[in-house]
């Protein structure tokens, strides 16, 4: 019973954090930009009419409210109907994963919308003059060597942990597959970091300084997420071995909340140079 | 320090790049040993084809204004300051102007000069090729 109560509390927190707190924060941020930097004064920031953004924002809010209510029903249903040993069939874990994906769906839609807006900004940008910094961008310009060292140490500690664990011959243990999966995930993160550092600038008007801040934020987020993923992977294996599987869905929900907090951070709006979006 | 290119300018983009890097070295905005962005980074930042930037870098390496240090990247050459005033294009143009002038004085037509020039240029047996 205590496991169920603990899970319900943690899952409710996940619901409010990802489907209420962050959406509200994002919506307020967008509203602040409209009000402080209106299309009349900052036309380059708005490649589409203002109604388009208002529509998108409304849909985003509705979708999040819908998910929040659905989540409340789900947690109530799980609390009342799921047997104590549901963890054995991993129903609760599957639901936490599926629901986290549903919760992140509006963020994904928002990302896709901003990608298409950047594309339009580039299309409407008729300037023939192009500028670039003559300094090379290097990893340590954006992240401290200490943090990189920490990420690498966590990764090798995980490899050592898996190698050590192989001696116990647990039937459920995936062995080297864990190393392959974590390596693949980290390579994927390295790819995203490289794309941010050396890839094409999405926003054609973004100042050099803002781009550096943006890259720094993304690289640091990836570093923390990499450590989070690796530690969580080791943690679940350990929890399984110590027969703590009934806490898995709770741990998973906490893990997803940490991932959400890490990945939904953004640059302080006051630190962004909006002058670049003014009419020439 | 930033680099600015104009795509509507009559001057080829790679020449603009060469010119700006040389000017930056001459002004002291970038010093020997300073790193330069990778071809990929500069091409993406300026929204240019990678080959255009690679061509500019190749010319700058040839003129000893920059040097490539393999995986470590591309850097300003130690003798860049003196080498950046060296303009091989201007030397070639001056030399050819003198040669064409001399040939015209002998009575050779432009067509003959053009054909002979192409033949000589395509002749692989000429030393230096």
Image (tube, rainbow, N blue to C red):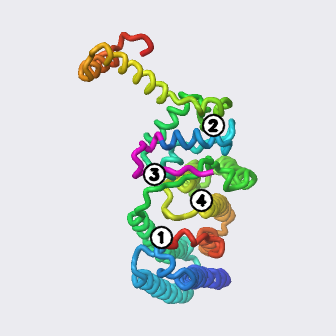
Part of the protein shown in magenta: B1-15
- Is residue B112 positioned above or below A6 on the image? above
Question: How many C-alpha atoms fall within 10 Å of the one at disc 3: few (<14), some, or many (≥20)?
Answer: some
**Which residue is the extreme one toward the right?**
A146
Tell which subunit mark 2 falls on. B
Identify which residue, A60 or A175, lies in the foreground.
A60
Q: Which of the labelled discs sits on residue B75, or is there none?
A: 2
Per the image, the residue denoted by label 4 is A208
Tell which subunit mark 1 falls on. A
Which of label 1 and label 2 is nearer to you?
2
Is the C-beta separation of discs 2 and 4 under 8 Å?
no
Per the image, the residue denoted by label 3 is B6
Tell me residue A76's x, y (percent). 54, 89
Callout 1: SS? helix
Tell me the CA gap for discs 4 and 1.
22 Å
Tell which subunit mark 4 falls on. A
**Picture quadrant of residue A28:** bottom right
Tell me residue B40's x, y (percent). 51, 45
Question: How many C-alpha atoms fall within 10 Å of the one at disc 1: few (<14), some, or many (≥20)?
Answer: few
Which of label 3 and label 2 is nearer to you?
3
Q: Which of the labelled discs sits on residue A195, or is there none?
A: none
- Is residue B15 positioned above or below A39 on the image? above
Residue at x 46%, y 75% (from the top left corner): A43
Tell me the CA gap for discs 1 and 3.
32 Å
Tell me the CA gap for discs 3 and 4.
18 Å
Per the image, the residue denoted by label 1 is A111
């Amino acid at each position: 019973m205590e496991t169920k109560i603990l899970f319900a509390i943690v899952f409710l927190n996940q619901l409010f954090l990802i489907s209420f707190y962050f959406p509200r924060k994002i919506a307020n941020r967008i509203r602040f930009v409209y009000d402080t930097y209106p299309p009349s004064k900052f036309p380059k920031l708005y490649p589409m009419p203002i109604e388009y953004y208002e529509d998108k924002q409304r849909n985003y809010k509705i979708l999040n409210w819908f998910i929040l209510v659905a989540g409340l029903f789900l947690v109530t249903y799980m609390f009342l109907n799921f047997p104590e040993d549901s963890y054995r069939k991993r129903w609760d874990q599957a639901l936490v994963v599926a629901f986290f994906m549903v919760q992140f769906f509006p963020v994904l839609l928002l990302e896709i919308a901003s990608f298409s807006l950047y594309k339009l900004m580039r299309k409407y940008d008729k300037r023939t003059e192009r500028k670039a910094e003559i300094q090379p961008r290097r990893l340590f310009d954006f992240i401290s060597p200490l943090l990189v060292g920490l990420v690498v140490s966590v990764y090798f500690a995980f490899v050592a942990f898996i190698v050590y664990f192989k001696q116990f011959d647990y039937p459920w243990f995936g062995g080297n597959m864990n190393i392959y999966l974590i390596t693949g995930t980290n390579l994927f993160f390295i790819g995203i970091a490289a794309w941010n550092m050396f890839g094409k600038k999405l926003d054609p008007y973004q100042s050099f300084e803002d781009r550096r801040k943006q890259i720094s934020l993304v690289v640091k987020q990836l570093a923390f997420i990499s450590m989070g993923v690796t530690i969580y992977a080791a943690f679940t294996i350990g929890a399984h071995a110590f027969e703590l599987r009934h806490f898995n869905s709770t741990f998973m929900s906490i893990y997803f909340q940490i991932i959400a907090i890490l990945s939904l951070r953004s640059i302080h709006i006051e630190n962004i140079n909006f002058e670049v979006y003014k009419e020439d | 320090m930033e680099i600015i290119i104009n795509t509507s300018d009559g001057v080829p983009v790679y020449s603009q790049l060469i010119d700006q890097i040389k000017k930056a070295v001459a002004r002291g905005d970038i010093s020997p040993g300073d790193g330069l962005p990778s071809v990929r980074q500069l091409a993406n930042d300026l929204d240019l084809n990678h080959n255009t930037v690679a061509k500019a870098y190749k010319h700058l390496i040839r003129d000893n204004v920059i040097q490539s240090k393999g995986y470590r990247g591309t850097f300003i050459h130690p003798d860049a300051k003196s080498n950046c005033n060296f303009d091989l294009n201007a030397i070639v143009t001056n030399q050819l102007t003198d040669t064409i002038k001399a040939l015209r004085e002998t009575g050779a037509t432009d067509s003959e000069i053009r054909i002979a020039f192409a033949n000589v240029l395509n002749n692989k047996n000429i030393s230096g090729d």
